[in-house]
Amino acid sequence: MKKFPNDFKWGTATSAYQVEGGNDNSNWEVWAKNQNITSAGIACDSFKRYPEDIELMKSINLNSYRFSIEWARIEPQEGMWDIKALDYYKDLIIRLNENGIEPFVTLFHFTLPLWVEKIGGFENKQTIKYFVRFSEFIAENLQGNVKYFITINEPVLFASLSYLRGYWPPCKKNVFKFFAVKRNLEKAHIGTYRKIKEIYEKYEWDQPQISVSQNISYLKSMDIISFVYCKLLDYILNYSFLDHIKDYLDFIGLNFYFYEEISLFHKNVSLHSSVSIEYSDKNNKQSYNFYPESIFNVLQVLYKRYKKDIYITENGISDPTDKIRSKYINEYLSSVYRAIKNGIPVKGYFYWTLIDNFEWLDGFNAKFGLAFIKNEKRILKRSGKDFSNIVKRNGLL
Ligand code: FCB
């Protein structure tokens, strides 16, 4: 059997806006409604049903859970703190800890309070200060019950989709803004990192571990001439952010989904994404591609470059029929195991995601969950059961 280290963290990852429901003060909710596209609405209703989420996690034997705190819920207006909202997160964290599930708390996972969006979001340097203040409020009030923080989820992907490619709010297409937002997010991370450390020191709580979750794609150059271009993309999209904040990272958080083939001659040669699978019903054939060895390569690069512990803070697949997910998880975990055997300190694996939830521009069409909701009940899928066996054995057969 391929045994994982005894203290390995097994979890699932979610984000507040994608699961909680009722985040009416979040910019995405208002933007989606204005665009006439699906918004999260009540999502998985986890704001009310979080005890059921915890039961589900227990049935999968998980010992960790990554979720985010919705800034718009905590500070719906500038300087106005919603204590009821805070109580929800406090209770969630207490219950997780009581059940032996380690909370990994993300502070920014793509969505902003409306008042922050109004002042220009992370395009505006002021937002850095406000974000650090929000993080300070959270750290103080969680009273040392959280040992792991992710300040920002996928900063470069966020900056790129929102300010360069124009897909996500505020839908801008401006390379200068992309770099400015990226830079401000670096500063926001560093400010938050320092502030949280300072608070934990002040109260003499055990020092927390703080990082970001960086989405890294494995990029493969398809010809000699595209090699330099590929290297440049690799640096800007995958590593420059981490390079700039590397003195303020206690571990590396890796979100891994993509294997991409890069060529200057063919635009968008291919993006082999684990994110969605095409099904063709006609001949009942499924076509899918995934490249589990690519995560091994990325883990190698990350360790060589930063010499830090690594947590895979997201990895997953949208698989509507649940036929491929177990194989996907097995193969990616085999690669992770190989990395560990090669001396790379991978400390945890968080599958994205616990329950089918709201998936940004795809609305509720994507099905990443280990469970689904039917008649208001959380029901574990076959792949969820398979994953629970891996976790229980702490290893792969
Ligand atoms: C990641 C995001 C997460 C979810 C998954 C499928 O890039 O961090 O919110 O959308 O993709």
Image (cartoon, helix red, strand yellow):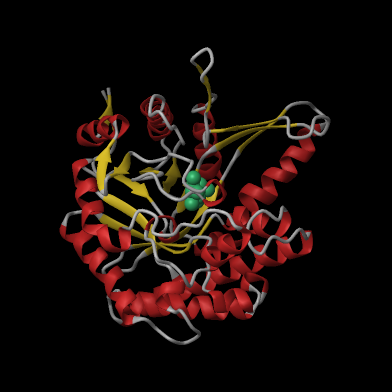
Q: Is residue 177 left or right of residue 384?
A: right
Q: Which one is in front, 87 or 209?
A: 87
- The answer to whether residue 203 is visible is yes
In this view, 319 is above or below 190 = above
Q: Residue 217 in the image: x percent, y percent?
A: 59, 40
Q: Residue 343 in the image: x percent, y percent?
A: 41, 36
Q: Quadrant of the N terminus?
A: top left
**Quarter residue 330 falls in:** top left
Q: Residue at x 16, y 60 (%)?
A: 98
Q: Residue 154 in the image: x percent, y percent?
A: 55, 54
In this view, 342 is above or below 206 = above
Q: Quadrant of the C terminus?
A: top left
Q: Residue at x 46, y 46 (%)?
A: 364
From this viewpoint, which residue is outermost toward the top? Answer: 283
- The answer to whether residue 307 is visible is no
Q: Is residue 396 left or right of residue 26?
A: left
Q: Residue at x 33, y 74 (%)?
A: 85
Q: Residue 200 in the image: x percent, y percent?
A: 34, 75
**Quarter residue 260 falls in:** top right
User: Tag count in the figure?
Assistant: 0
**Quarter residue 386 falls in:** top left
Q: Is residue 26 left or right of residue 62?
A: right
In this view, 383 is above or below 101 = above
Q: Is residue 156 left or right of residue 93?
A: right
From this viewpoint, which residue is outermost toward the bottom? Answer: 79
In this view, 215 is above or below 115 = above
